[in-house]
Amino acid sequence: MNPELWIRLGEAILQVIFIVILATVVIKVGTKIIDQFYGRRKKGPFRISARRETTLTKLSKNTLIYVVYFTALVMILETFSINVGALIAGAGVAGLAIGFGAQNLVRDIISGFFIIFEDQFSVGDFIGTAGVEGFVIEIGLRTSKVKSWGGEIHIIPNGNITQVTNYSIDNAAAIVDVKVAYESDFERAEQVINELLKEMPSRYSSMISTPEILGVVDLAPSEITLRIFAETLPMEHWPVGRAIRKEVKLRLDEEGIEIPFPRIVMYSREGTGGVQGGERV
């Protein structure tokens, strides 16, 4: 074979290695610059929330990686004397052919842009969307990743995110229903629960204010239902609700106030004389 061909091939390989190393260095340096930039924003006059900072940091890093890799690919193609301009022109012609099939991709990118621009949700938020609930672990221009309680990671195209419930932005509310038996002293039960609720904010820092009894919400066949409302910090309404149920149960047991349980009325029939008696168990 022609020695000049081997020399050109060796030079091309060395150039490719240099381009790859240069791209790696640029990504590492750019990543550090991005971290420093958003770190300084914390001390500057124009501060952003930690949620938004995490989201923008990850998005900026992903965009940097895409741009550097694309530039490196173009440089590698040029190293092997491939006409990049012709490829781009051909891609433009092909793009016209597949443009109608790329509508979902365009919709995903546009939706992703508005999600980030409007700060609908950020990395670390707990949201519900597209039939999925979980913590947002990544937001991209095309897809968003949501991790549910069980550890499953759901990759959702941004175009499918048409409605979002964000549990992490504002204070939450714990709604707890407490059932009291008809046989119990209802007013005494209400007084005991009120005394307990006044004590709870000192033990639970996630409570914004003292919980309160809203009143009777149901008169069932065997019980009276009281509803308790407690304002909490974002994402704390579930643990606060569990704590209220536990403490109410323990306090009512201490006071001898009965929480209702299912009852069955049994009748015995003797002879033909009809019902002779009944017993509730």
Image (spheres, rainbow, N blue to C red):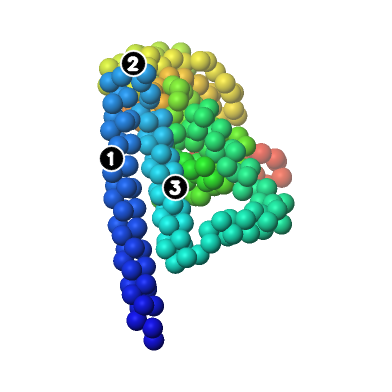
Mark 2 to mark 1 CA distance (whole Å): 22 Å
Q: Is residue 174 above or below residue 86?
A: above
- Label 1: which residue? 32
* Residue at position x 50%, y 64% in the image: 82
- Label 3: which residue? 67
The secondary element bearing badge 2 is classed as loop
Front tag of 2 and 3: 3
Crowd band around label 3 with a 10 angstrom C-alpha radius: few (<14), some (14–19), many (20+) = few
Q: Is residue 176 above or below residue 277?
A: above
Front tag of 1 and 3: 3
The secondary element bearing badge 3 is classed as helix
Q: Amino acid at mark 3?
A: Val
Q: Position of residue 28 (x, y in %)?
A: 29, 47
| Residue 280 visible in image | no
**Badge 1 or badge 3: first in the primary sequence:** 1
* Residue at position x 58%, y 23% in the image: 218
| Labelled disc at residue 45 | 2
| Residue 47 visible in image | yes
The secondary element bearing badge 1 is classed as helix
Q: Position of residue 241 (x, y in %)?
A: 41, 29
Mark 2 to mark 3 CA distance (whole Å): 30 Å
Residue nearest the viewer, comparing 245 with 81: 81
**Badge 2 or badge 1: first in the primary sequence:** 1
* Residue at position x 33%, y 16% in the image: 45
Q: Position of residue 58 (x, y in %)?
A: 39, 40
Q: Amino acid at mark 2?
A: Pro
Q: Amino acid at mark 1?
A: Lys
Q: Position of residue 153 (x, y in %)?
A: 45, 50
Q: Is residue 127 left or right of residue 268?
A: left
